[in-house]
Amino acid sequence: MGTLTRDKFGGVAVRSRTLAKTIREIIPLALLLFVLWLIFTAKTNWHHLLLGAIVSVLFSWFSYYLLRGRLDPHLKAGVALRFPLFAVLLFWEIIKANWDVLKRVLAPSLPISPRIIDFESYLESDIAKTVLANSITLTPGTVTVDIQGQRFFIHCLSEDQVEDPGEGRLQRMTAWLLKEGPPEMRRLK
Amino acid sequence: MSEYVRDAFIVLFSLTGLFFFVGGTVGLLRCPDLYARLHPSTKCDTLGACSVILALCLQAGASFVTLKLLAIAFFLLLSCATCGHAIGRSAFRSGVVPWHKPGVKPWPIEEDE
């Protein structure tokens, strides 16, 4: 229920406003927990549903006090809407690159030339850098080995995976997903 | 009839998964060093496991089992990427120079840095 600072009219309005804010902020987490409850219990009896609803509201309420201020402000509803398309595009990248890695390691001459390269990212928030690093790591042939500030260190199996616009595409997809970085990069091509 | 088509797809996806698993294992054995071995071991397994999970989803049909399998696939992708990154990062920070071909600059770090 939030702040102890009171305005000159006596704090009741402040208190109810922050209560409404609290409720608004725990709703996404409670919904997520409830969906997970549905999936993992796999029961649709009314008493299971009721128990799930109570537990998800209680736990999101408790964790609000633990996590308040630490939840990333970039995670908005739009991200959840854009995520399915992002996942499909990422999966396509994974399949393409996976095929490439498989061809390389099965070829008798083993045509690899591994090295670590670096590039400067234009993404700034921690969540965007995490999404980009995980996407790069998921895409075969490239592993993010370190991030120092905006500088990404990528181990790649061969140099033509660096020249490949894949990294730029992944960064663009991340910028589009989280609406970050230069405005012309926030669109999918 | 549709049963046969479904079974055919289940077999197809299972075999695809098997193929990627075999490829990943061969890659793991053939690659020269730790960094290079991260690629086939974490990646081919990822797509292989996803393919097998897809086959199991088809087998389960539209039910809660499918949703559970999709949740497993999601967490598998998340943890595969994270642990691959963790292994790579610990090697990088302890200064393991990647295996490289002669004449190739192994990493963008200057020696006097």
Image (cartoon, coloured by chain):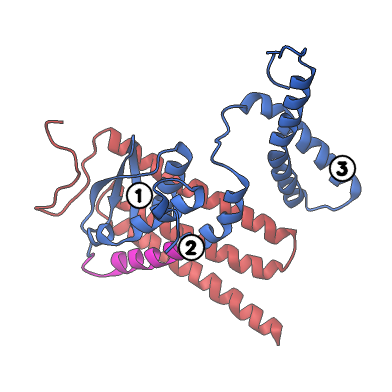
**Residues in magenta, as a range:** A92-110
State the residue at coordinates (56%, 65%): B52
Q: Chain of mark 2?
A: A
Report the quarter where the C terminus of chain B lies.
top left
Mark 3–mark 1 distance (CA, rounded to whole Å): 44 Å
Task: State which mark lies toward you, 3 or 2.
Answer: 2
- Indicate left or right for B20 with A154 as reference: right
Q: Decide: is B111 above or below A165.
A: above
Residue designated by label 1: A143
Image quadrant assignment for residue A54: top right
State the residue at coordinates (27%, 32%): B94
x then y, percent, for residue A50: 87, 42
Chain B drawing hue: red
In magenta stretch: residue B62? no
Element at label 1 = strand
Q: Decide: is A41 above or below B52.
A: above
Residue designated by label 3: A50
Chain A drawing hue: blue
Q: Nearer the viewer, residue A60 or B74?
A: A60
Mark 1–mark 2 distance (CA, rounded to whole Å): 19 Å
**Mark found first going from the N terminus, 1 or 2:** 2
Task: Report the residue that reaches farthest toward the left.
Answer: B103
The lab-note entry on whether marks 3 and 2 share a chain reads: yes
Residue designated by label 2: A89
Q: Chain of mark 3?
A: A
Element at label 2 = helix
